[in-house]
Amino acid sequence: MNTKVVKIEREKINDQILLEAARMIREGRLIAFPTETVYGLGANALDPEAAKKIYAAKGRPSDNPLIAHIAGPEDLPPLVAKIPDTAKRLMDAFWPGPLTIIFPKSNNVPYETTGGLDTVAVRSPKDCIAQRLIQLAGVPIAAPSANTSGRPSPTLAEHVYQDMNGKIDMILDGGAVGIGVESTIIDVSGSVPILLRPGAVTLEMLEETIGDVELDQAVLGPVSQGQKPKAPGMKYRHYAPRAELILVEEEGTVSDKVITIIKELTEEKSRQGAKVGIICTDETVSQYTQGVIRSLGSRMREETIAHNLFAVLREFDELEVDYIFSESFPESHLGQAIRNRLTKAAGYHVIEVGENK
Ligand code: AMP
Ligand code: MG
């Protein structure tokens, strides 16, 4: 298949191109497009055959459900069996935006889209290209991240091209995405809302809007074999770079001891002939001298860290490093999403630098 890459200028959206893309979506074909979180791989969410093509292109296990993207709350009723009050408040506060809400599904939504579940995940993206595409398509668009399953999510059209060239019909290139980590996912179907995946709509922001929110087990740590997390995707090793990634932290953040350990590990592995990457921040970057050193930005601006994270993991793939030693980030606000992605990418390999070590 020939994958057409088309540049879209955000300031001057060309409806001609988006009309063609929208028509292709209605025909059951696959289009990658930017959203404010990461690039999505879109298909008609109501068409079981189209949904199956997404799983094939990504190499995604068929029990890992897709998120249906709609223009706004007005498009929601046909997809869901019920809209809880909590969901209404969340939609008022955060839609359009990086928040995915889980609803009991209606019969219109095929099980191919929901990975066999009786619930459906829905989000209204804010990105103007995504919004326009959904409006023109006139159908909800199922769109997981547009990466090969298991690779870091794409934050540039080039990343999508690396993974999807020859497998999908079109890539709409809207440049770099804004946020850089996937949407927050919340389940409000039970008596207490449960956060299934942290993102740019933070736990603190959610609790301010709807009161107490519980953290799903899969957010807190690894999912053991046989355990069924609420968000099926969380049991798969996600966001994985090719190298062995190890997080080093002291009380959830960086310290002089952490820097020393990362330098020692880099020295040791380099001596053994391995190529080592280091993920650090503007505040610490000057302290490292050995290995391929990448700063994610300043700790004062977690938005920048989130924005750069997946691109740096992909860069390390290209550079074919064998090990990546990464600093860690405190588990609050956007840091919770950053740390969640990093620990998952590391397969939960975290070195805790204690006082006695
Ligand atoms: P992605 O779009 O690639 O970020 O993946 C979508 C994520 O949403 C996966 O981790 C899924 O497990 C999760 N998800 C989608 N639909 C549901 C659902 N009905 N219930 C729980 N989690 C879901
Ligand atoms: Mg994904």
Image (tube, rainbow, N blue to C red):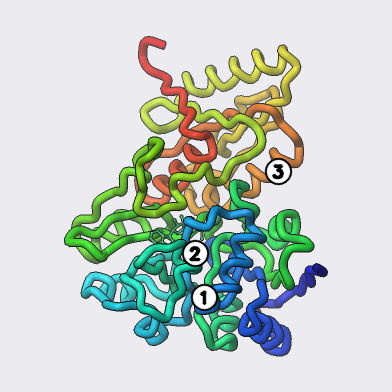
In the image, is 211 to the left or to the right of 264? left
SS for dot 3:
helix
> In front of the other: label 1 or label 3?
1
Residue at image location 61% in from the left, 84% down from the top: 26
What is the quadrant of residue 250 in the picture?
top left
Q: Quadrant of the C terminus?
A: top left
Residue 103 on image: x %, y %: 33, 70
Give how far apart the Cα atoms at labels 3 and 2 are.
Answer: 27 Å
Residue at image location 24% in from the left, 59% down from the top: 193
In the image, is 37 to the left or to the right of 320? left
State the residue position of label 2. Answer: 66
Q: Nearer the viewer, residue 105 or 18?
A: 105
The residue type indicated by label 2 comes to Leu
Residue at image location 17% in from the left, 61% down from the top: 191
Q: Quadrant of ligand 1?
A: bottom left
> In front of the other: label 3 or label 2?
2
Residue 108 on image: x %, y %: 42, 81
The residue type indicated by label 3 comes to Glu
